[in-house]
Image (cartoon, grey):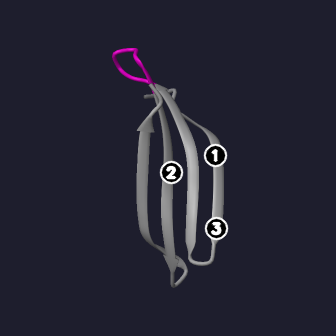
Amino acid sequence: MSDLEFLDERHFVQGDRGCSEWALVATRADVSKLEVDGCDLFTFGRGKIQVKNSLLKNRQ
């Protein structure tokens, strides 16, 4: 997917937790459109990411 783009990015951090919200748009190899909303949830500790969970939802 050479035309992959991340859009509408928003990031939040509160204490040892963080959230990154985004939208992804791209064209698949079969020329169909891919549109996904996503959210990554982070837990930080010792200066590093300890846990990362990702949630995805197709827009269509």
Instruction: Say which residue appears at 65% left-offset and 50% top-offset.
Output: 10
Q: Amino acid at mark 3?
A: Val
Q: Is residue 4 visible?
A: no
Q: Which residue is mark 3?
A: 13
Rendered view: 35 above or below 16: above
Q: Local crowd at mark 2 within 10 Å, few (<14), some, or many (≥20)?
A: some
In the foreground, 22 or 46? 22
The image shows residue 47 at horizontal and vertical percentages of: 55, 80
Q: Residue furthest left?
A: 30
Tag 1: amino acid: Glu
For disc 1, the marked residue is: 9
Residue matched to label 2: 39
Establish if 26 lies above or below 41: above
Q: Residue at x 55, y 38 (%)?
A: 23
In this picture, residue 8 sits left or right of residue 55: right
Between the residue at mark 1 and the residue at mark 3, the CA separation in whole angstroms equals: 14 Å
Q: Position of residue 57 (x, y in %)?
A: 43, 39
Q: CA distance from mark 1 to mark 2?
A: 10 Å
Q: Residues within 10 Å of mark 3 (few under 14, many from 20)?
A: few
Q: Quadrant of the N terminus?
A: top left
Question: Is residue 28 within the magenta segment?
Answer: yes
C-alpha distance separating marks 3 and 2: 13 Å
Q: Earlier in the sequence, mark 3 or mark 2?
A: 3
